[in-house]
Amino acid sequence: MIRFANWRLPSALAGLASLCCLPAAAQSPWPQDTKNPSLVIEAIPFPANYMNMGAAFLSDGRMVVTNAAEETTNGEIPGTNANSLVTIVSGISGDMSALASKKIADMFHQPSGVTVVEDKVYVAERDGFYRINTLDNPANTGANKTKVIGWPTPEAGFQWVNGEQWHQWVMTPMYYGGKFYGPYGGTTQPGGRAGASATTSFSGAFLSWAPDGAGGLTKVAGGLRQPNGMTLGANGQMFVTDNQGGWLPACSFQLIKPGKTYGYKQMSGFKANWAETLPYEPPIAWLVDGVHQSASQPMYLDRGPYAGDFIIGDVNAPGLSRVNMDKIAEGTYNGGLFFFTGGFATGAVNRLTLNPKEDWFVAGTFLAQGDWPSGAAKPMYRVKFSAANLPFEMREIHSRQGGVEIVFSQPLDPASAVPASFSLQQWHYNRTVEYGCCIDQKGNPFTPASVKLSDDKKRLFIGSTDLAAASERELKITAAGIKSAGGGPLFQTTAYFTHNYQSTTAFDAAVAVRPAAAALPDLSGALRVSTAAGLRVHVSLDGAYRLSLLALDGKLLSAQSGRAPRDFAFPASAHGLRLLRIESAGAVFTRPVPD
C-alpha cells in the first residue's frame, strides 16, 4: 500500500434523478447554520475576496494562496487572467491586524492547487504542473513560472473530443517520499455523464511524477471520476474525495492503493478507461447524497481534539463533515460520517489547509453553485480549535460482532441509552451508468433489538442481527433520544457508517484502555531505485525487512529479505509499471517503479 467535482444536473433533471433513484429516507439536509462550539471561525481580512483553489505554508509561517479568476460554467479552460494568481500572505497568526499579501505570479488559466516543498512553490494548472521561479519581488509576475510537466495530451488510438476532457486535470497535488502525487479526472460528457470514450490512457488515474518531471507521469491507481482534492494521512497514506455521477451513486472518500480501481468506467459501446479491469476497492466512506453533492478537498487532522479524523467540504454547501475511520486491519477500514460544522456564511468550502505549527486551519471558499469554481468570490477563513467548548457528540463508530459500537465524547445518561432512542436504516449503493444513481433501500427505519452501555458510560453497543457488513452497505443512525449524563442534547443527532467490513471483535463493557500506538517507522526514504540497467534497489535500513516486487494487480513477482543496508537486483519485465513494497517493524511502504 502506498503510504500515502462534480457537475450537477440542471435542477429539473437533478430532481428527476433523485425521484427515480434516491429514496427520501436516505436524505438528510446539511445543517448549514449549526457551528461546532469548539471552533472559532474568523474571516481573513483580505482587501478582496477570491475563488480559493489552494493554500500551503512556508517554513517561516507565511501562507501561499492560489486563486482563480473566472467561474467554470461548462468545465471549459478559461483564458489566462491577471486575477488567476499566487500570493504570499504574512501576518496570518495572532490578531491578523498586520495582515499583508503580495502577488508573486499570475496569468494562469485556472490554478487548482498549490504545494510547498522545502520553500519551493509549485502550482497545479489546467494544462500542467508549474514551479514558481522566485518568491522575492519578480519583475514579471506573469512569467514567474516554469512548466515542470504537462497533463496528458492526445495519444494514438484515443479520440480527444473537444469538451469531453473538460475536467481532466489534477486537483491539490501533494508531495511525499520524493514524488508528487495527484488525482486526475476521468472522461465524461460535458454535463458529467459517462457516455464518452476514454480520451487518454491516463483517464481517471491517480498519478505520480518527479519534482523535475523526469520520467513523465506514472499511473498508480485508477477508476476516478471527478476528484476535487487529496490529503496525506498518517504514515503517508493518501486519500481522495471523488464526485457523484455515472457509476458513482454518491460522493466518496477513499484510500488510494496501488493497482486498484475505484469504480468509474465508460459506458458500453465506448472505449474503456485503462483501469476498468483492475481489482476494485470500495470507498472508506460514502459521503451521503443530500449531505454532500460536490465533495471538495479532504484534510487530515494530526493534532487537536479531533486528531486522527478527516474533515471534508463541499462546493455546494457552507459546511464541513468529519470522517472517523474504523480500522479492521492494516489498510482495511470502515468509515463514520458526522456533521462537523457550519459557520461559513454563504461560502462553499473548497480548500482546507492545516497550519503545520499552530492549532488552526484555513478554509478557502466560493459561492455554492455546483461546478468548481463558480459563482461569486467569497472570504477565506481561519478556524481555531477551542478544547474548552467541545460538544456532546457521536465521535466514532465501530463494527462489532452482532452490531456496531458508538463512542460518545461525554458520558451518557443511562436512562436515555435504550433501544427507543435510536432509529436505524440501511441501504446498499449500486453503481450504474445513471447519473448519481442508485441506492437499494433495505426496508424501513427500525429500532435496534438491544443496546448495552460501557462501564464508563461513553461507549454504547447497538445490537441487531441486521447490522452485518457488506460491500457498499450504508447505515444511517439517528440518535434523537440520547442525552448526556448532565442532561444535554447531542450536537448532531445523525451519523452515517459505511460498513464494508465485519469486525470479529465483541463489544466489551469494561472501560476501554487504549494504549498509545507505537509510532511506525517512515519507510519512504529507505529505498533508492535505479532503472538505468534493469531494476536495482538499495535499501538503507539497519533492522530486518522484506522487499517485494509486485505486478500492478498485486501479484507477487519476487521477494527478498535483509537485515542491513544492501543492494538488490530484480529481473527485467515486459509488464512496464510494477510495484516495489518494503515491510519493516509493522510499517509498509509501496511505490510504483517502471522498467
Image: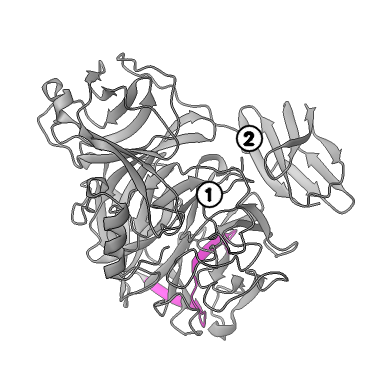
Compare residues 250 and 373 and report the one nearer the observer. Answer: 250
Q: Where is residue 595 in the image (x, y as percent from the top left)?
A: 81, 51
Q: Quadrant of residue 272?
A: bottom right
Q: What's the residue type where badge 2 is placed?
A: Val
Q: Position of residue 256 (x, y in %)?
A: 55, 46
Compare residues 13 and 74 and report the one nearer the observer. Answer: 13
Which of the numbered marks, if any, corresponds to residue 587? Answer: none
Judging from the image, what secondary structure is the residue with disc 1 in? loop
Judging from the image, what secondary structure is the residue with disc 2 in? strand
Local packing at callout 2 (Cα closer than 10 Å; few below 14, some 14-19, many 20+) is many
User: Label 1: which residue?
Assistant: 262
Q: Write the residue at 64% across / 57% down.
A: 274
Is residue 211 visible to the viewer in this orientation of the structure?
A: yes
Q: What's the residue type where badge 1 is placed?
A: Tyr
In-image side of 495 versus 54 (left or right): left
* Disc 1 and disc 2 in contact, CB within 8 angstroms: no
In-image side of 443 versus 295 (left or right): left
Q: In this view, does 387 lie above or below 469?
A: below
Total numbered badges shown on the rendered structure: 2
Q: In this view, does 510 lie above or below 346?
A: above
Q: Distance between the residues labelled 1 and 2?
A: 21 Å
User: Label 2: which residue?
Assistant: 588
Local packing at callout 1 (Cα closer than 10 Å; few below 14, some 14-19, many 20+) is many
Q: What range of the chain is rendered magenta?
A: 100-120
Q: Write the residue at 54% across / 31% down.
A: 330
